[in-house]
Amino acid sequence: MILPIIETERLILRAPRAQDAEPIAHYLNDFAVSGNLARVPFPYHLSDARAWLRTRHPDTMVDDANFCIELKGEGYVGHIGFHPAQDGPVIGYWLGKPFWGRGIMTEAAIACLDWFFAVSRAPVVYSGVFHFNGASLAIQRRLGFAETGRSWLLCLARGVEVEHIDTQLTLGVWKARRT
């Protein structure tokens, strides 16, 4: 499927492209950002961003869709997307630190989840946060994610396994919250 461009009041969600490498590297080379993510190393170099972008294709499976987040008038600010896992699709996201606390990720996640549940057959989306990331957990709670347990997950930026709060959002809960 070709990824759509999703527009909200303040945001444009679109497929990644080669020119995103510099802002991706800039924002992910901040430990305050990468230290909250499982699959991102630190330091994070331009070559890392370019290598990751080479794995992204606009004609992808729904459960491997990734969107760049653009703030209208300001440009690239972060990323939101899905990856397939054993239990089902997992949503992950990050935002450059200068854009924290402005409701951007909640707005992006609502638009992304609306799209995902409309085009996929998935009855549930999984996610989670490292135990110290209260801001991300608050976003997930606002979206309707429920905590399902705790696990240990490798954080590449920290180089150790970190306690992880596992969460899930069912289609039924999402529909109820969106009506």
Image (cartoon, helix red, strand yellow):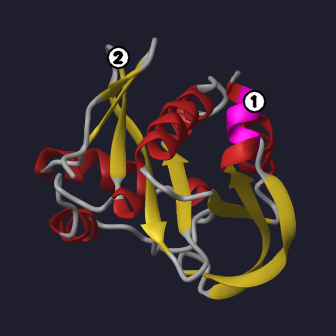
Out of 56 and 96, give the one closest to the viewer. 56
Principal secondary structure, stretch drawn in magenta: helix
Q: Determine whether the residue tagged by mark 1 lies in a helix, strand or loop.
A: helix
Task: Using the image, determine if residue 177 lies above or below residue 92.
Answer: above
Instruction: Choose top left, top right, bottom left or bottom right for residue 142.
Output: top right
* Residue wearing tag 1: 177
Out of 165 and 143, give the one closest to the viewer. 143
The magenta-colored residue range is: 173-177
Instruction: Choose top left, top right, bottom left or bottom right for residue 33.
Output: bottom right
* Residue wearing tag 2: 72
Out of 63 and 14, give the one closest to the viewer. 63
Out of 107 and 120, give the one closest to the viewer. 120
Task: Using the image, determine if residue 126 lies above or below residue 26.
Answer: below
Callout 1, which amino acid?
Answer: Arg
Name the residue at 78% across, 50% down: 137
Name the residue at 56% across, 27% down: 107
Picture mark count = 2
Q: Position of residue 161 (x, y in %)?
A: 70, 87
The crowding category of the residue bearing disc 1, from other C-alpha atoms within 10 Å (few below 14, some 14 to 19, many at least 20), is few
Q: Determine whether the residue tagged by mark 2 lies in a helix, strand or loop.
A: loop
Name the residue at 30% across, 67% down: 45
Q: Residue 26 magenta-drawn?
A: no
